Structures are given as C-alpha cells and as structure tokens.
Image (cartoon, rainbow, N blue to C red):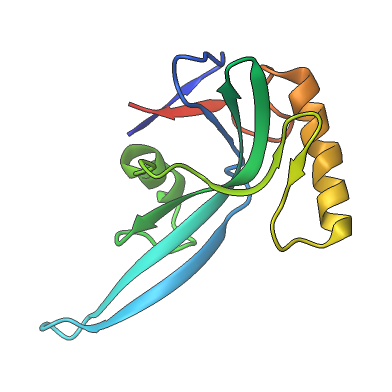
Amino acid sequence: MMYQSDKYTTSRFFYAIDFDTFLGKKHIHGTAINGHEYNYYQISFPAIWFKRKGDELTVVKGSVGHHTKGHDFTDDGLIEDMIQNMDSRYGGNAQFRWDGMFMWGPEKTWDDTVAAQKELDQHWENFPAIPAGYSGWWALR
C-alpha cells in the first residue's frame, strides 16, 4: 500500500508520480475453465525520485509500475488499485539519472538525453520540492 506525503524525508524512499499519464499493456493468459479470458494488466506511471549516497544527490526519471487483474485501463478504479496494491520492492524503472555533473541514460538519443538533463536539472536544483506536474511524494507502507 502506498501513502502520500507533502514533504520529502530522507528516511523514506519517495516517488513523485504523474497519475495523469500512464502506459498500459494487456496480457492475455488463455481461457479459464468457465470460459472467461484470464488477463492481467501491466501499468506504468512516469515518476521522479531522488537517491542520496553520502553527500551526493541524484535525481532519477523513470516509471513505477503495477500489475492488476481487476481493472482495465479505462476503469475509474485504476489509480486507487495501484495506490492500495502497488508492489515496488524492486524500485522504479530508471530511464535517466542526473547528479549535477554526470548524466546516465542508456540507449537514448542525444536529443532525449539533453531534454531529460534540462528537466532533471530543474528538479535537482529545486529539491525537495514536488516536481511540477507530479502528484506529491508517494511511498510504500
């Protein structure tokens, strides 16, 4: 289960999540005995999070994901289901990392990397403010 906080604290691992944008994929696993399809849905929401190692602060852009059997991508309960049931024990899926000096973004174009660096530099400089366009700080209970 996730909970929201208006304040970032280093004692918890928080994600700033954009719930207005998501990527979804439907997986069909065949037909159950009663004739209904057995499906599950993989949903990913864009996210920003920070990592601190010693005195070094790194901002990360990527996504956090959730698998659900109970909701299609158009259901109103999709976000609530993610908040109640998200399992992020493996963390987010990083696409870019920026520590103010070094940028990491595997298999990305130069233009994507430059655009991400500009965005992440703003978040890095404004830390611990909630990034614009994201829904507060979210952590697991």
The vertical placement of 110 against 55, above or below, is: below
Q: Residue at x 82, y 56 (%)?
A: 112
Q: Is residue 109 left or right of residue 139?
A: right
Q: Residue at x 77, y 35 (%)?
A: 120
Farthest residue to the left: give it: 33
Q: How many marks?
A: 0
Q: Position of residue 115 (x, y in %)?
A: 86, 48
Q: Position of residue 19 (x, y in %)?
A: 57, 43
Classify residue 16 by image quadrant: top right
Classify residue 12 by image quadrant: top left
The vertical placement of 12 against 33, above or below, is: above
Q: Nearer the viewer, residue 84 or 11?
A: 11
The vertical placement of 113 against 136, above or below, is: below
Q: Is residue 56 left or right of residue 38?
A: right
Q: Is residue 23 left or right of residue 70?
A: right
Q: Position of residue 60 (x, y in %)?
A: 65, 38
Q: Nearer the viewer, residue 19 or 126?
A: 126
Q: Nearer the viewer, residue 105 or 65?
A: 105
Position of the C terminus by quadrant: top left
Position of the N terminus by quadrant: top left
Q: Residue at x 48, y 62 (%)?
A: 73
Q: Position of residue 104 (x, y in %)?
A: 72, 46
Q: Is residue 116 left or right of residue 137?
A: right
Q: Residue at x 49, y 29 (%)?
A: 138
